[in-house]
Amino acid sequence: MEISLERWRVDHNSGYISLDDMVGVAVKDISSSANRRAKRLRVLVGVAVAALASLALAVPTAASAAEPATGPVGCGYGSGGPYADTLCWIDMASYNDATARSTAGQPFSITLPGGYTTTFTAHTSGTNPVRASGFPTWGGAAIGNSIYLGTPGQPALYQDAVFGPYGVSTITLDDITVTDSSGSAVQGWQFVGADAESTFGNESITFTSDSGVKVLATYESTPGQNGCQRNIVQVDPNTITCTGDLTSSGYGTALVSSTQPSSFTQTMTVGYSADAREGVAFAFQSSKVQADSTVVNRAAAGDTFGVSVTSPESTVVGRASTGDGSSASTGQLTVLPRVTDGTAYTLALTGNNLPAYTPTWTCDVNGVADPALSATGVTSLSVSPAAGDLVVCTVSLDVAAVVAPTTPPTATPTPTTTAVAVPVTAAPPTAKAAKPALASTGLDASAIALGAAVLLALGAGAFAIRRRVAAPK
């Protein structure tokens, strides 16, 4: 016959005993009674030692005493998975379950990338204690094993097992606010909740937000895996539940998001099974903006250029200068998208000799060129990244083309219809011209006078001749 005994494992972080990583100890039926008694004795001694160690370690140490979060803590990014580059997971390392279960709750101040600060108060209730944990919370969880690898800190809030039916832990973050580096309130940011462990068939997570909640993404390393993503129900605009199953191998996960909630709750429910537990995590979904400049040609050797990114609150998020070089980049700057008001970030170009250049802007959104963000001849550009977007804009600087001066054409006067009064003088009556003698001859006056004299002389001679002829003999 074979008898299986389970080895107890003590969680040194929480001081609670669990049955995780069970190991069977088998005692085989041995014909020799002496050997049988020896085996039984070794097993009993081993169990006794394990039990004593468990009892000793089950007493919480001074390090686990309730202390409020002191000083700002941050958030961090992991690699791989949906929106990995823009999900900043809140480090809950300062979480204290006793303080969070008090009437006042546990206040937090979190410094976010980009100069932002968020504040909130954590309130916890329910049967199962909760503690901060890194990713992954256990070997079968998708987060930390398959996605969001290398996330810093302890972003998960993880249940400790309590033996009994249906354990529940409810964690609410209340009075959530976000301000920028100047202290101005930021509007329209995105908040995210996630299943940070693996949801079995008798387990569930309920996400609740006072500003509405929606599914952001689901993940499965292979289709049809178990987990929270398998059975998602939108109960109402403010509530989503997800329930796991045990129909296949491996586990996936689900992420939900909410726009600028003042209160966000995740409730973890586990069924009656040894070491059943759940885990959740919180994140801000940011965007990233990058401004680059490239000098194609310089008009003068000393020309320098700068690029900057400014928030809607007029806070400079980042800047860079070419100096004597040919390029500059702000790098990827973390910004919070403005989902509700659509306010834009301003990308600006500066320089000591800008009139000599023609700036040309081109932008990629998530690696794809966006023609709507192209511009030429301007020194600034406005962009409104959506949650999770990576917007990279480059301004290229080339010497402006020199246009030879030309003489403008002389304008031709436009004819007008204005009447101008002109005085009119009456012409004198025309005299009837006398018929000129010999007008057709074309002779001048002297010739005419000579001819007349000749005619007179001839006439006189002819008269004298007639008188002699006519006189009597």
Image: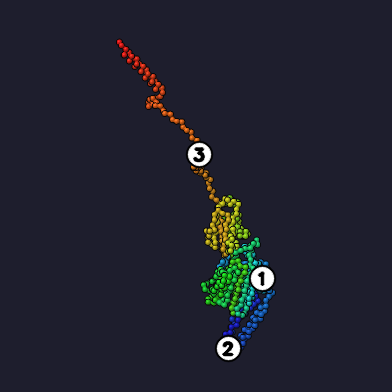
Q: Which mark is residue 463?
A: none
What residue is disc 3 on?
420
Does residue 144 appear in the picture of this structure? no
Real-space CA distance between mark 1 and mark 3, rounded to the nearest whole angstrom: 96 Å
Nearer the observer, disc 1 or disc 3? 3
**Looking at the picture, how far across and down is residue 220, in whole percent?**
54, 71
Look at the picture and state if 299 lies above or below 146.
Answer: above
Amino acid residing under circle 1: Gln
Marks 3 and 2: CB-CB under 8 Å?
no
- Among numbered discs 2 and 1, the one appearing first in the sequence: 2
Display colour scheme = rainbow
What residue is disc 2 on?
31
Amino acid residing under circle 3: Val
Look at the picture and state if 29 lies above or below 214.
Answer: below
The residue at the point 56 percent across, 59 percent down is 393
Q: Which mark is residue 106?
A: 1
Nearer the observer, disc 3 or disc 2? 3
Label 2 Cα neighbours within 10 Å, binned few <14 / some 14-19 / many ≥20: few
